[in-house]
Each structure stands twice: as C-alpha cells, then as structure tokens.
C-alpha cells in the first residue's frame, strides 16, 4: 500500500518544549521531515539557505504570495515568514510526514487550505512548570517571561481548534506519544480512500469471475 505523508502542525506555548520534541522525533525516526520556512530576514551567522530557512528577497517573497506558492505566511517586524507549498508537497509525495512548527493563527490557515492536516498542541502539565521552564532558560528577563505568560493566556483560547492535546511532562514519553498519534492517523479510513476503493474493485472483479 502506497503511503502518502501526513501534514502535521505542532503548536504550543513558548517554553512548552515543542522545539525539543520535534528535534528528538527527527533524530529517532526517519519518516519525518521538518518544514523549512521562507523568510526575507537576513541570515544570521552560521545559518545556511535551505537548512534553517529559505532566504528570499522581499520581491521574490511577494511573488510567491501572488502565485499562491505559500501554505501560510505572516509579517513580523518588517520581515515576511512563510511555509513554501512546493517543498511540503514534495516531501508528502515522498511519503514523509511533514511537521510545521507554527503558532495558532498560522495553524488554522493551514487547516483551511489542507483540511486533512493534523493539529497537535503541546502544553506543560501546569502553568507553574511553564513559568519555571521560561525562567530556567536563563535567556530572558522577567519582563519577557511575564509577556510570554500573557501571550500563553491568549493562545489557550484556541486550544479546542486542535485535534490532540499532548502534555509534555517528561520529554521521552511526550515524544513517543506524539509519534504514536501521528502513526495511528495513517490508519484513519478517511486517509485510505484509494486503498479502500482498490479493495472494493478487486472484490467486485472476484465476484464477476465466480
């Protein structure tokens, strides 16, 4: 049975550990591909085109928008960020399960364009744990931590839009649960219409030959 890849959107509060989970998932299983975003911002030191991002000029990015070449896009601090459609579709045809790590608004745009997209929301077991993880990073001021907590309160309003809620208590268990959910999605009847049709056709032909 030909297995086409599934498009997966993973969102979660800043500090939920979603980035670490995605990295671990890609290290442990070879059937996943992390979608690479396109951006108009300048590459940072050590970043390579086609690895961290597809770096585009503003003109090229706007051409992609006009040609419907992006699954979703947004503008932050005078720079565009978006998900190139061609890259994602190519990986799906190769049978890879493609993961997009984006925020809620982007996730809902993707679901609108691709209704079979699987939406996963990652959360820590409680908000005290979230605060501790944000402080524990040691990279942000308390003011930034508080603004991220306020942002999390806004994001929490959209959790019901997701197909699955995954609690990241321990990294290994959470990663395994995400993997199990994605693999079980491959067995949904809605994702196997061609296979079902072929079985029916073969059964009809078999009856004719009786």
Image (cartoon, grey):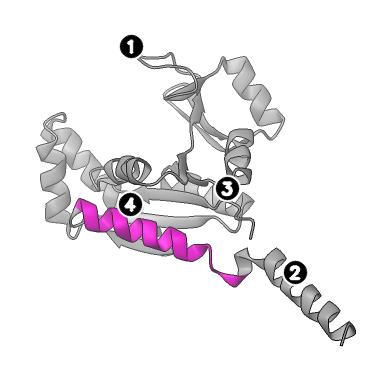
The answer to which image quadrant residue 182 occupies is bottom left
Q: Nearer the viewer, mark 4 or mark 1?
A: 1
State the CA–CA distance, disc 1 to disc 3.
Answer: 33 Å
Q: Give the alpha-carbon distance from disc 3 to disc 2, as whole Å.
A: 19 Å
Comes first in the chain, label 3 or label 2: 3
Confirm whether residue 151 shows in the render.
Answer: yes
Q: Which mark is residue 45?
A: 1
Task: Write the start and end of the magenta stretch as one range.
Answer: 171-189
**Above or below 161: residue 75:** above
Cα gap from disc 2 to disc 4, whole angstroms: 46 Å
Q: Where is residue 131 shown, x and y percent of the image?
A: 14, 47
Which quadrant: the N terminus?
bottom right
Instruction: Name the spot of residue 12 as percent of width and height, x first.
Output: 33, 49
- Of circles 4 and 3, the one toward us is 3
Q: Residue furthest right?
A: 208
Relative to 10, residue 136 above or below:
above
Using the image, tell me which numbered label, if any, was put on residue 154: 4
* Residue found at x 63% / y 50%: 113
Secondary structure beneath dot 4 equals helix
Badge number at residue 95: 3
Query: Circles 2 and 4: CB distance less than 8 Å?
Result: no
Q: Residues within 10 Å of mark 4 (few under 14, many from 20)?
A: few
- Secondary structure of the residue carrying numbered label 2: helix
Mark 4 → mark 1, Cα distance in angstroms: 33 Å
Residue 91: image location, x then y, percent:
57, 40
């Amino acid at each position: 049975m030909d297995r086409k890849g599934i498009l997966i959107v993973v969102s979660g509060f800043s500090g939920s550990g979603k980035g670490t989970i995605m990295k671990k998932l890609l290290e442990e299983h070879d059937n996943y591909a992390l979608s690479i975003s396109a951006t108009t911002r300048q590459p940072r030191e050590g970043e390579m085109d086609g690895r961290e991002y597809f770096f585009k000029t503003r003109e090229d990015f706007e051409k992609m928008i006009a040609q419907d070449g992006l699954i979703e896009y947004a503008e932050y601090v005078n720079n565009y960020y978006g998900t190139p459609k061609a890259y994602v579709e190519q990986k799906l045809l190769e049978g890879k399960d493609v993961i997009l790590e984006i925020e809620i608004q982007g996730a809902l745009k993707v679901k609108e364009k691709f209704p079979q997209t699987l939406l996963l929301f990652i959360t820590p077991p409680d908000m005290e744990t979230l605060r501790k993880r944000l402080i524990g990073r040691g990279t942000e001021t308390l003011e930034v931590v508080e603004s991220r907590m306020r942002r999390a309160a806004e994001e929490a309003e959209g959790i019901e839009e997701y197909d699955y809620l995954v609690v990241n208590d321990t990294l290994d268990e959470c990663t395994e649960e995400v993997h199990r959910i994605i693999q079980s999605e491959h067995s949904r009847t809605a994702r196997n219409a061609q296979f079902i049709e072929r079985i029916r056709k073969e059964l009809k032909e078999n009856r004719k030959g009786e």
